[in-house]
Structure formats: C-alpha cells, structure tokens
Image (cartoon, helix red, strand yellow):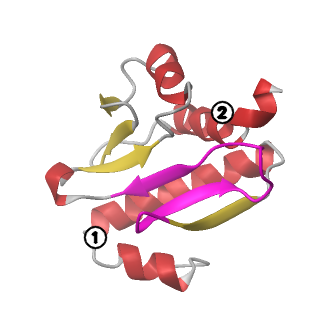
Amino acid sequence: MQNLAPNLTALIRHWPKKAQSRFLELRSIVHTAAQDADVDLQETTKWNEPAWLPSKPRTGSTLRSCWHPKHADALGLFLNCNSTLPETMRTLYPNTFTYEGKRSLWLPLDAPLPEDALHHCATLTLTYHRSKA
C-alpha cells in the first residue's frame, strides 16, 4: 500500500480487500482536503484505528476511520462527538451518509464515494478550531 506507514498497513491488512480499497480512496480525499486547506496533516492511530489530524495544535479536529465486522459492508468515518461537526454534517448532507450515534458516518463499500461531501467534511474537521477563531 503506497506511502502508507507500516503501523497503518498492519492495521488494515486484515480488513477485506474492498474495505482496504475504500480506505485508500478516503485517505486520498483527506490528504487532498488537507492540502487544499493548507493544513499540515499527521497520519497516525487513535484507539487502534487509522486517524488524521493537523500537526499544528488548535487548528482542527481528528478524523478516524475503521472497518468492523458489525458493519461488514461499510467503512466508518468518525468525527469528534464533542464538536459541532456531526450535527453540521447531518444538516448539510442528510441523505449522503448513513449516520449512527453522535460521531459515525458509514460509507458503503459497493457504492461510489461522495467525494465532494467527504472533501468538505475533511476540510471542516481539519480546520475546525481555525474556523472558530
């Protein structure tokens, strides 16, 4: 998996191939959004799941992603539940994602990704504190 840190490769190599492919598509969108928003992106793990966050503190919030057998046909994207981000996404994109709880957006493995909505979500998340200032 090109340019993926070994710790992230180790996490996703056990996922189904469709979930791995979808993750790499999502990762590309997140990286593009960070570049477009002039955010230096850190790719890491949180709670043993792939995560992205701004390298500079007080810039934005964290995005996490994970595949889980409970949602075998989807890839999860998780927002900070203590922010306004989940509600903002529900308001802006009520029918674009499948929402669960206060933080989860589920992306079907067998449907095209809503690239524009995901780019917007990543931008809002990665610049969350910067845009509040």
Q: Position of residue 30 (x, y in %)?
A: 61, 51
Whether residue 74 can be seen here: yes
Q: Nearer the viewer, residue 56 or 50?
A: 56
Is residue 51 within the magenta segment? yes
Q: Which residue does the numbered mark 1 point to in the structure image? A: 15
Q: Position of residue 31 (x, y in %)?
A: 66, 55
Residue at image position (77%, 44%) is 58
Q: Nearer the viewer, residue 105 or 119?
A: 105
For the residue marked with disc 2, what is the amino acid?
Answer: Leu
Residue at image position (61%, 41%) is 122
In-image side of 101 versus 28 (left or right): left
* SS for dot 1: loop
In-image side of 74 versus 46 (left or right): left
Q: Residues within 10 Å of mark 1 (few under 14, many from 20)?
A: some
For the residue marked with disc 1, what is the amino acid?
Answer: Trp
Q: Position of residue 105 (x, y in %)?
A: 37, 37
Q: Which residue does the numbered mark 2 point to in the structure image? A: 124
* Stretch in magenta: 46-66
What is the spatial separation of the Cα atoms under label 1 and label 2, in whole angstroms? 28 Å
Question: In the rendered image, which quarter is residue 106 located in?
Answer: top left
Question: Would you place residue 4 above or below residue 40 in this image?
Answer: below
Extreme residue toward the front, this view: 82
Is residue 118 within the magenta segment? no
